[in-house]
């Protein structure tokens, strides 16, 4: 349900999260810049940006399916040849480094 209010002689439409999701989906498929889309739809650019950020954060916080998962399980297509030794290092920032090693058998 939409409620309206007057602001500086302009009619302001209040939208809920579902309406903003639909608008953001249309924007994603429009090929327009944010400025063009907002001008065409009569949206405030800062309001558009706030809702875009808010809904993107909610999506990251609560994944709903495999495509939204934060981690994806990887599988090998073919069996790996016998490996004698391997080293993996991940630089995590702030001077942190994760090292994984397998010594020769």
Image: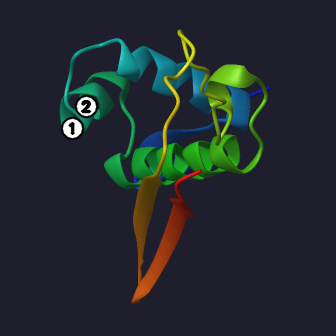
Q: Residues within 10 Å of mark 1 (few under 14, many from 20)?
A: few
Alpha carbon separation for disc pair 1 and 2: 6 Å
State the image coordinates of residue 93 (x, y, percent, origin top left): 40, 79
Discs 1/2, front: 1
State the image coordinates of residue 14 (x, y, percent, origin top left): 64, 40
Q: Is residue 93 above or below residue 11?
A: below
What secondary structure is marked by label 2?
helix
State the image coordinates of residue 45 (x, y, percent, origin top left): 33, 47
What secondary structure is marked by label 1?
helix
Q: Is residue 7 above or below residue 75?
A: below
Residue for point 72% across, 51% down: 61
Left-right relation of 40 to 10: left
Q: Mark 1 — residue?
A: 35
Task: State the scheme by which the image is colored.
Answer: rainbow
In this view, the residue in front, 103 or 16, is 103
State the image coordinates of residue 102 (x, y, percent, origin top left): 56, 57
Left-right relation of 36 to 65: left
Whether pointer 1 and pointer 2 mark residues with C-beta atoms closer than 8 Å, the reply is yes
Q: Residues within 10 Å of mark 2 (few under 14, many from 20)?
A: few
């Amino acid at each position: 349900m939409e409620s309206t209010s007057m602001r500086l002689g302009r009619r302001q439409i209040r939208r809920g999260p579902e309406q903003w999701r639909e608008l953001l989906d249309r924007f994603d498929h429009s090929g327009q810049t944010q400025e063009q889309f907002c001008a065409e739809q009569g949206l405030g650019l800062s309001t558009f940006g706030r809702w875009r950020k808010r809904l993107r954060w909610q999506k990251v916080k609560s994944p709903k399916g495999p495509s939204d998962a934060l981690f994806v399980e990887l599988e090998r297509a073919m069996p790996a040849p016998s490996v004698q030794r391997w080293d993996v290092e991940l630089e995590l920032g702030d001077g942190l480094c994760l090292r994984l090693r397998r010594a020769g058998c």
